[in-house]
């Protein structure tokens, strides 16, 4: 039997010599693939398979040395030599047919096995959105043809795919669930010929992986030239993607290398394999990492250096000052100012370099006296992560539901902040104990088994060994996850003058308590039309007059609904992505067992992409999805058991802002459903005054319990009195200004609508009135200080919270300026940063911003996103006029005065002592203010009336008292309308003329000098 395959000069020759069937040996030889012999067309040294009596062993047992010339059929005995090896006991011979069947099973094919020139492709644990649907798979081959792989249901919400390639090159695997691509699909994989003679890589880890699980693949360096058998032979690896993935390699000493890496976040990764500084065939490989992502928890502790500066300060001075420190290398970071016990001004910062530093202290942008100050940092003060010592077995292994402890010693490491993050299959609780001897004891308690990544940084640099990988074993909590995935199409562009609509669903409310406004990019705010589209579904309708980002505010009982204020772009979208998706609704705050829990998702500003919803908790959820086809959708889910659930919302495999949401599902209401709120206090009451509400039990049997939570988080009991029958009075005294939550429970279960929101104080801070501007939300450079302004004028007093998420922590501060607050930050690592600005817990319009940071890194990049934040209690602010007097903000208008028209006799002539009228039509001239002025020969006109009669049409009246010529000026904003200023002549009604006047009978003027009077 001869099988000769010519692969570009490398021949693969399989041949057998049979004797009589009485039991004499036969030999089947697979010639060496590649190598010196293969490349020059010779058989070379190969691996043989020994059989006995017509039977064949599926194990290599003999080396065969062929002659220098390729063998010809029929073979001659001198054309090859062979050496036998003893076969290990316990192995069984296979027939040719059994061998073929075994290979078919291994390759996972339903048809006969294909050429053995290619390695089988195996992809395990591909997650499905849910169970019970139809799964299909298709392979697109390099030639353009299609093939069908084998799909295996793992019975755990995942499938495995097996495929035996028939072509060399780049393939695409499409896995669909109910005709929709599953997460990560299509997958790409490269197929190499086994006998290529070059360095090749193969394995699942080059195609697909699961977050938190090792991804493995093999590299074969056989026959690749000198030095290829070791890692020192020019082999280099790199993994780039959504998270930092540590790579581990093992040289198997047989010409192959085992590679493993651990991704901790879903997304697309690039795996580069280079040999002799050149990419091997197929590299870089595109790997789709799927999964829910890792649960993360983090803490920050540590010390900073304090330096006293000359001069004493007061507490009020500190609020108006800001400071930054510049290192010898030029790195400039914000630093904190504080009043020291001796009254002097002090700064607190993290020393990063040895040498002379400059500290700039400014008030409203101007250096204070003697600023900048010079300070010197010694070698012992600089934080050195390499000198941090960590001890404890829990850095490599741990147990679930147990506090796993390790110790950190920073006594010899200088000054620096310590940051710790732990991510894995569950969000591990972290405990930190200061031993007051320069050491810390850290304990973490995970609830699910699996691999956990522990990032430990000191002075923004990884300590030795970080990030650590800990394998946690033990029992889990048996939490179940249900997922759905839907493709979102980009909505058509909105133009000026077109009808716009923003929809939301809020069941169980009165539409009379809803209100909506739209603010244009120019700052003009107008009421919007709000109507009920269907039961519980409402739409905000408006017609934009400008291009740009509009702010749509929707309030229920004078408070913003979840998700409001909304960003609505007229014209082309500036940027898209997960950070532009927002969600809100009762189902993301609380829920009830065996009932639909609903929320809205707005994807309009994000563009096209895939939207994935997941619900994880004690029981499996049933998820319902409805697309409104206007850039928003409605999601409802129901669960069978009470407890804590996590609702994840992803767009293009990335979490949207504030996702995942933690939701507590209460038991079924039962009797609590009958209880209702009969009377509620008015919003805006003053603090320290008693408030009361009425609750009606409506025949429900059980116990009523009421509490209220103040803005500070303090919880107090309410006084409950029975008034009559089932009617109860609930009384409490709020002592703080802000939003209070009234919790009304019946038999330990919230009644419908609880907790209720009550605003105490004259005005609630309005996030819709807050704007953010500056270079710091557009671009930044690593190691350079940047800033942006949060304008809170006319937004009221509230809580400003700014968070910066990125590849490293940032040094940041927030100081008060005339128009609001200036936020400064210094990134230390290049990458994408997300800046979220919230006012009273609501995202302001545009938040979060995606900022691209360039430049060289000044710290170690972590494996996860790191957060830095600052929170400020703001004071009420307003714009300052030219003379220093406070006044109202004047919006920026977009208008065209040339399109204003006017008509009426009052534009040319004016009767003395009578009202003179004309009209102005500005309906086609945009938005602005109408100004009318009349100036006479001696003084301005005494009376001018302007009445808006709708749609920018105005009726104007004025009265003049003196004879002479008048000047009438009509302006639309700062510009005169056509014809303005108008020249107006007075008409004098001379009472000495001989005109005929008709006077009703019995009526006579008291004073008539002369004239003709006709009596009727």
Image (spheres, helix red, strand yellow):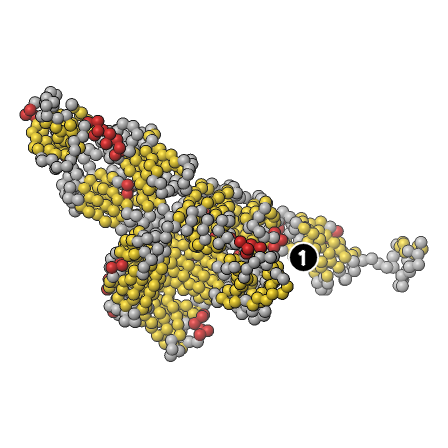
- At horizontal 21% and vertical 34% (from top left) the residue drawn is 194
Check the image and report above or below for 695 versus 157. below
Looking at this view, name the residue that lies furthest to the bottom. 342
Q: Quadrant of the N terminus?
A: top left
Q: Estimate the x, y position of residue 324 in percent, counting from the top left.
A: 37, 66
Q: Which residue is mark 1?
A: 932
Between 387 and 824, the one nearer to me in the picture: 387
Q: Is residue 938 left or right of residue 685?
A: right
- At horizontal 75% and vertical 55% (from top left) the residue drawn is 916
Check the image and report above or below for 229 versus 810. above
Find residue 680 and report its image quarter. bottom right
- At horizontal 38% and vertical 54% (from top left) the residue drawn is 833
Looking at this view, name the residue that lies furthest to the front. 701
Q: Secondary structure at mark 1?
A: strand
Q: Is residue 467 left or right of residue 844?
A: left
Find residue 983 and report its image quarter. bottom right
Q: Is residue 1005 left or right of residue 35?
A: right
Q: Estimate the x, y position of residue 575 in percent, counting from the top left.
A: 44, 48
């Amino acid at each position: 039997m001869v099988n000769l395959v010519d692969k570009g000069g490398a021949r693969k020759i399989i041949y057998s010599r049979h004797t009589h069937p009485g039991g004499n040996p036969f030999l089947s030889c697979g010639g060496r693939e590649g190598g010196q012999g293969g490349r020059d067309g010779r058989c070379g040294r190969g691996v043989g398979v020994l059989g006995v009596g017509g039977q064949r062993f599926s194990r290599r047992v003999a080396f065969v040395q062929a002659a220098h010339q390729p063998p010809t059929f029929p073979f001659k005995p001198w054309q090859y030599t062979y050496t036998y090896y003893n076969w290990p006991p316990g192995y069984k011979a296979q027939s040719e047919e059994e061998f073929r069947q075994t290979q078919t099973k291994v390759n996972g094919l339903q048809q006969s096995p294909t050429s053995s020139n290619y390695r089988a492709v195996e992809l395990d644990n591909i997650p499905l959105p849910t169970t019970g649907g139809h799964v299909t798979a298709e392979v697109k081959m390099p030639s353009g043809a299609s093939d069908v792989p084998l799909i295996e249901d793992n019975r755990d919400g995942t499938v495995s795919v097996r495929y035996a390639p028939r072509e060399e090159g780049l393939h695409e695997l499409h896995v669909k669930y109910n005709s929709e691509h599953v997460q990560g699909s299509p997958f790409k994989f490269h197929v190499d010929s086994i006998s290529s003679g070059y360095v090749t890589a193969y394995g699942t880890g080059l195609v697909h992986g699961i977050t938190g699980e090792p991804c493995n693949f093999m590299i074969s360096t056989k026959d690749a030239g000198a030095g290829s058998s070791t890692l020192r032979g020019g082999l280099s690896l790199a993994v780039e993607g959504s998270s930092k993935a540590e790579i581990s390699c093992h040289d198997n000493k047989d010409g192959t290398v085992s590679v493993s890496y651990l991704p901790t976040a879903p997304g697309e990764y690039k795996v580069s394999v280079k040999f002799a500084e050149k990419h091997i065939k197929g590299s870089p490989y595109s790997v789709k990492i799927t999964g829910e992502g890792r649960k993360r928890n983090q803490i920050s502790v540590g010390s900073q250096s304090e330096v006293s500066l000359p001069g004493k300060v007061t507490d009020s001075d500190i609020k108006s000052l800001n400071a930054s420190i510049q290192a010898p290398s030029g790195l400039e970071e914000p630093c904190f100012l504080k009043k020291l016990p001796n009254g002097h001004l002090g700064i607190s910062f993290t020393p990063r370099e040895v040498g002379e530093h400059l500290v700039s202290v400014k008030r409203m942008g101007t250096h204070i006296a003697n600023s900048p100050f010079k300070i010197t940092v010694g070698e012992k003060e600089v934080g050195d992560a390499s000198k941090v010592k960590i001890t404890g077995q829990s850095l490599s292994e741990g147990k679930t539901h147990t506090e796993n402890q390790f110790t950190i010693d920073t006594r010899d490491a200088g000054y620096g902040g310590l940051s710790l993050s732990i991510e894995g299959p569950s969000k591990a609780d972290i405990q930190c104990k200061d031993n007051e001897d320069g050491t810390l004891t850290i304990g973490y308690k995970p609830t699910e088994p699996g691999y956990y990544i522990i990032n430990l940084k000191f002075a923004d640099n990884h300590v030795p060994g970080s990030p650590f990988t800990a394998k946690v074993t033990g029992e889990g909590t048996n939490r179940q996850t249900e997922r759905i995935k839907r493709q979102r199409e980009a909505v058509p562009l909105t133009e000026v003058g077109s009808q716009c609509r923003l929809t939301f669903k809020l069941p169980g409310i009165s539409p009379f308590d809803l209100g909506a406004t739209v603010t244009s990019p120019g700052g003009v705010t107008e009421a919007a039309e709000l109507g009920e589209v269907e039961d519980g579904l409402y739409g905000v309708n408006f017609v934009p007059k400008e291009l740009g980002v509009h702010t749509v505010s929707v309030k229920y009982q004078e408070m913003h609904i979840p998700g409001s204020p909304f960003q609505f772009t007229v014209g082309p979208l500036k940027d898209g992505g997960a950070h532009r998706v927002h969600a809100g609704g009762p189902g993301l705050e609380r829920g009830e067992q065996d009932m639909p829990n609903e929320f809205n998702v707005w994807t309009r500003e994000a563009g096209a992409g895939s939207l994935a919803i997941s619900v994880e908790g004690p029981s499996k959820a049933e998820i319902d999805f409805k697309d409104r086809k206007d850039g928003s959708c409605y999601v409802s889910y129901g669960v069978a058991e009470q407890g804590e659930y996590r609702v994840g919302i992803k767009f293009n495999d990335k979490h949207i802002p504030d996702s995942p949401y933690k939701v507590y599902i209460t038991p079924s209401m039962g009797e609590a459903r009958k209880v209702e709120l009969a009377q509620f206090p008015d919003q805006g009451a003053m603090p320290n005054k008693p408030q009361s509400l009425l609750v009606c039990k409506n025949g429900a049997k059980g116990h009523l319990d009421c509490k209220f939570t103040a803005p500070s988080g303090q919880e107090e009991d309410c006084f409950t009195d029975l008034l009559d029958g089932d009617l109860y009075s609930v009384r409490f005294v709020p002592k703080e200004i802000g939003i209070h939550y009234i919790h009304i429970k019946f038999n330990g279960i919230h009644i419908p609508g609880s907790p209720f929101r009550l605003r105490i104080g004259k005005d609630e801070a309005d996030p819709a009135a807050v704007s953010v501007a500056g270079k710091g939300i557009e671009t930044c450079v690593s190691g350079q200080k940047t800033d942006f302004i949060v304008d809170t004028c006319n937004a009221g007093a509230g809580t400003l919270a700014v968070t910066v998420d990125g590849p490293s922590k940032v040094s940041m501060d927030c100081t008060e300026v005339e128009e609001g607050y200036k936020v400064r930050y210094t990134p230390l690592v290049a990458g994408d940063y997300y800046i979220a600005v919230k006012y009273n817990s609501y995202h302001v319009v545009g938040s979060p911003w995606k900022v691209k940071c360039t430049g060289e890194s000044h710290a170690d990049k972590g494996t996860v996103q790191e957060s830095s934040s600052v929170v400020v209690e703001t004071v009420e602010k307003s714009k300052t006029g030219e003379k220093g007097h406070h006044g109202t903000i004047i919006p920026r208008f977009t208008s065209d005065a040339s399109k204003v028209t006017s008509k009426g006799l009052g534009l040319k002539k004016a009767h003395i002592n009578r009202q003179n009228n004309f009209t102005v039509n500005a309906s086609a001239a945009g938005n602005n203010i109408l100004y009318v002025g009349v100036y006479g020969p001696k003084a301005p006109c005494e009376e001018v009336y302007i009445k808006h009669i709708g749609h920018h049409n105005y009726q104007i009246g004025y009265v003049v008292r003196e004879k002479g010529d008048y000047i009438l000026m009509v302006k639309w904003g700062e510009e005169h309308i056509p014809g303005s200023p108008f020249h107006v002549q007075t008409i004098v009604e001379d009472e000495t003329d001989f005109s005929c006047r008709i006077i009703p009978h019995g009526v006579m003027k008291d004073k008539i000098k002369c004239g003709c009077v006709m009596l009727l």
